[in-house]
Image (tube, rainbow, N blue to C red):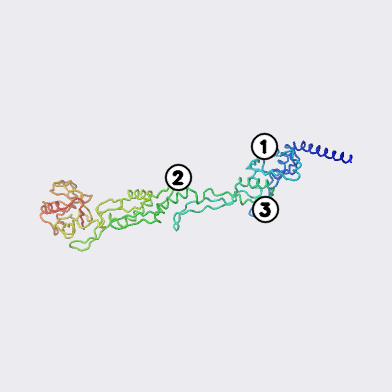
C-alpha cells in the first residue's frame, strides 16, 4: 500500500516536472501543429521558423495553367522575393500560451496570412518568368476600351469594351501568392487578364452619348421661301465630332456644303428665270443683280449654335441679296419690265399694269445687257458720267431723273435728246446701255417706283 502511494506521488511529480519543462520549452518555440502560410513551424524558434518559412516559400513551385491547360512552372525563387514576415510571425508566436502546450497536440494552429502583404517580388523577374514559359504580353491581344463610334447605318453608338488576354502582372502575383498561402500548387491565369480601362457605363461615355442624342433628336427646320426643310437626325450625326477635350463639335465645312445644296434648290441669285412677259408670253430672263441666296457663312454659325443649344428650332435662314420673299419668286407682282425687242417698258404694281411707254435701249456695240435687276438708288436731278466707246471720250450728261439698277452703270433715265422712241431708233441712236425714256413718262415712273423694285430686262 505504502509502495503504491509512493509510486503515484512519483508519477505526479514526474508529470508536473514534465509539464513545467514543456512550458519552459514552448516559451521559446512554436507549439506542435503550428502551420504558418502553409509551412509547418512546429517546435521551431522564431529564428528557425523565419528561416524555414523563407526557404520553404522560395523553394515552392507553382504550375501555371491557362483555361485548364498547363503552360509552365514558376519557382518563387525566380521572382527574386523579399520576405517581411518577422512582425506577423512574432505576433503569431506571442498569441500562443505556453501553459497550454499540451492542448496543441490535439488542436492545429493555422496562421493564414496574405502573403502579398509580406513578400515583395520583382516585377521584371515575374515578367521574365512569364516570358520564359511563353506568356509574354507581346503576342497577346490587348483589351479594347469602350468607345463612341459612327457608322452610316447606326449613327453614333457605344462600341462595347472587349476583353483581351494580356496579363496583369499584379493580378498574377496576387493569384500566385494566394495559392501558395492556401497550399495549392496551381494558378489559373485566365482570372488575371488586363481589364479594359473604360467600359460602356463609364460616366464620360454616358455623358457624351446624352449630348449626342440631345443634339441629334432636336428638330431644326428652315423655312425657305415658304418651303420647309427639316434637317434629319442622320444628317446632324454626320456633322458631329469631338475635340481633344472630348467636347462635342460640329463640322463647319460639312454644314456649309449642306447649305450649298439648299441654295442650289431654292436660291435665285445667278440663275435664269422664267417670266410671263406682257407682249411675248413666257420668256427666259438671264441672271442679273437681282437674286438672293442663303448666307452660308452666317447661317452655318447659326446652325452650330442651335445644335449646341439642343432646343427645337423653326425659323428662316439668314439671307443675302435682293428679292427674297415667302412666296418664292424674287420678282413678285410689282416690277418694271423692259422688252428690248419691242422697245417698250411697263410698270406693274401688285399685278396691275400702271405704266407703259416706248423706250430706246442700247445701240449695237453698247447693248443693254438683259437680266433681272433691282433699283438701288433714286436721284433727281443727276449727272451721268462715264466713257463713250463710240466717241472714245468721257462724258457728263445731266438728266432730271435717274434710276440705276445694275452694277455696271445701266439705269433708267429721261432722254430729252432723243427725237423718237420705240421702233428701230435704238439701232441708229441707241443708248450706251441705259433705258432712255421720254421725259414726261420718266417723271411719272420716278414717282411710282420704290427702291428695291425689280427691273426685268429681256
User: How far apart in space, not on screen, are marks 2 and 1 (Cα)?
Assistant: 49 Å
Please identify the residue farthest to the bottom as the structure is shown.
281
| Residue that numbered label 1 is attached to | 87
Q: Quadrant of the N terminus?
A: top right
User: How far apart in space, not on screen, are marks 2 and 3 (Cα)?
Assistant: 46 Å
Which marked residue is nearer to the observer: mark 2 or mark 1? Answer: 1
Q: Where 360 falls versus 100 (above or below)? A: below
Q: Position of residue 43 (x, y in %)?
A: 76, 40
Question: In the rendered structure, are the residues bearing label 2 and label 1 in contact, judged by CB atoms less than 8 Å apart?
Answer: no
Q: Position of residue 116 (x, y in %)?
A: 64, 43
| Residue that numbered label 3 is attached to | 70
The tag earlier along the polypeptide, 3 or 1, is: 3
Q: Quadrant of the C terminus?
A: bottom left
Which marked residue is nearer to the observer: mark 3 or mark 1? Answer: 1
From the viewer's side, name the closer residue of 317 and 138: 317
Q: Position of residue 180 (x, y in %)?
A: 68, 46
Q: Is residue 57 left or right of residue 457?
A: right
Quick one: label 2, few (<14), some, or many (20+) residues within 10 Å?
few
Q: Is residue 292 left or right of residue 217?
A: left
Q: Which mark is residue 245?
A: 2
User: How far apart in space, not on screen, are marks 3 and 1 (Cα)?
Assistant: 36 Å
Quick one: label 3, few (<14), some, or many (20+) residues within 10 Å?
few
Q: Is residue 415 left or right of residue 125?
A: left
Amino acid at each position: 500500500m505504502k509502495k503504491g502511494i509512493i509510486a503515484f506521488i512519483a508519477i505526479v511529480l514526474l508529470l508536473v516536472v514534465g509539464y513545467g519543462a514543456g512550458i519552459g520549452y514552448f516559451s521559446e518555440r512554436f507549439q506542435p501543429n503550428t502551420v504558418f502560410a502553409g509551412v509547418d513551424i512546429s517546435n521551431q524558434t522564431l529564428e528557425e521558423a523565419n528561416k524555414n518559412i523563407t526557404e520553404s516559400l522560395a523553394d515552392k513551385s507553382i504550375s501555371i495553367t491557362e483555361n485548364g491547360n498547363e503552360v509552365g512552372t514558376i519557382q518563387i525563387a525566380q521572382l527574386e522575393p523579399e520576405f517581411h514576415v518577422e512582425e506577423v510571425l512574432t505576433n503569431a508566436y506571442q498569441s500562443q500560451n505556453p501553459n497550454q502546450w499540451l492542448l496543441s497536440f490535439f488542436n492545429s494552429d493555422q496562421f493564414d496570412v496574405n502573403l502579398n502583404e509580406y513578400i515583395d517580388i520583382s516585377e521584371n523577374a515575374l515578367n521574365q518568368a512569364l516570358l520564359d514559359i511563353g506568356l509574354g504580353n507581346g503576342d497577346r491581344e490587348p483589351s479594347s476600351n469602350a468607345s463612341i463610334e459612327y457608322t452610316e447605318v447606326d449613327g453614333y453608338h457605344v462600341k462595347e469594351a472587349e476583353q483581351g488576354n494580356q496579363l496583369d502582372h499584379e493580378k498574377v502575383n496576387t493569384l500566385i501568392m494566394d495559392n501558395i498561402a492556401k497550399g495549392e500548387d496551381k494558378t489559373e491565369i485566365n482570372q488575371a487578364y488586363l481589364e479594359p480601362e473604360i467600359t460602356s457605363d463609364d460616366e464620360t461615355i454616358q455623358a457624351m452619348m446624352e449630348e449626342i442624342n440631345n443634339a441629334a433628336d432636336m428638330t431644326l427646320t428652315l423655312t425657305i421661301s415658304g418651303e420647309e426643310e427639316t434637317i434629319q437626325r442622320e444628317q446632324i450625326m454626320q456633322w458631329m465630332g469631338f475635340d481633344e477635350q472630348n467636347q462635342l463639335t460640329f463640322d463647319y465645312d460639312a454644314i456649309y456644303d449642306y447649305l450649298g445644296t439648299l441654295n442650289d434648290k431654292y436660291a435665285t441669285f445667278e440663275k435664269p428665270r422664267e417670266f410671263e412677259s406682257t407682249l411675248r408670253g413666257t420668256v427666259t430672263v438671264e441672271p442679273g443683280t437681282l437674286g438672293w441666296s442663303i448666307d452660308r457663312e452666317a447661317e452655318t454659325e447659326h446652325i452650330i449654335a442651335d445644335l449646341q443649344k439642343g432646343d427645337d428650332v423653326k425659323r428662316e435662314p439668314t439671307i443675302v441679296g435682293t428679292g427674297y420673299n415667302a412666296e418664292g419668286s424674287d420678282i413678285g407682282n410689282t416690277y418694271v419690265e423692259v422688252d428690248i425687242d419691242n422697245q417698250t417698258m411697263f410698270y406693274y404694281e401688285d399685278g396691275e399694269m400702271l405704266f407703259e411707254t416706248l423706250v430706246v435701249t442700247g445701240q449695237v456695240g453698247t447693248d443693254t445687257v438683259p437680266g433681272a435687276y433691282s433699283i438701288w438708288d433714286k436721284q433727281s436731278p443727276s449727272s451721268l458720267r462715264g466713257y463713250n466707246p463710240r466717241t472714245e471720250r468721257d462724258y457728263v450728261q445731266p438728266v432730271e431723273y435717274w434710276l440705276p439698277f445694275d452694277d455696271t452703270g445701266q439705269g433708267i433715265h429721261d432722254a430729252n435728246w432723243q427725237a423718237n422712241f420705240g421702233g428701230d431708233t435704238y439701232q441708229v441712236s441707241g443708248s450706251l446701255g441705259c433705258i432712255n425714256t421720254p421725259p414726261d413718262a420718266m417723271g411719272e415712273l420716278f414717282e411710282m417706283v420704290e427702291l428695291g423694285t425689280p427691273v426685268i430686262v429681256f
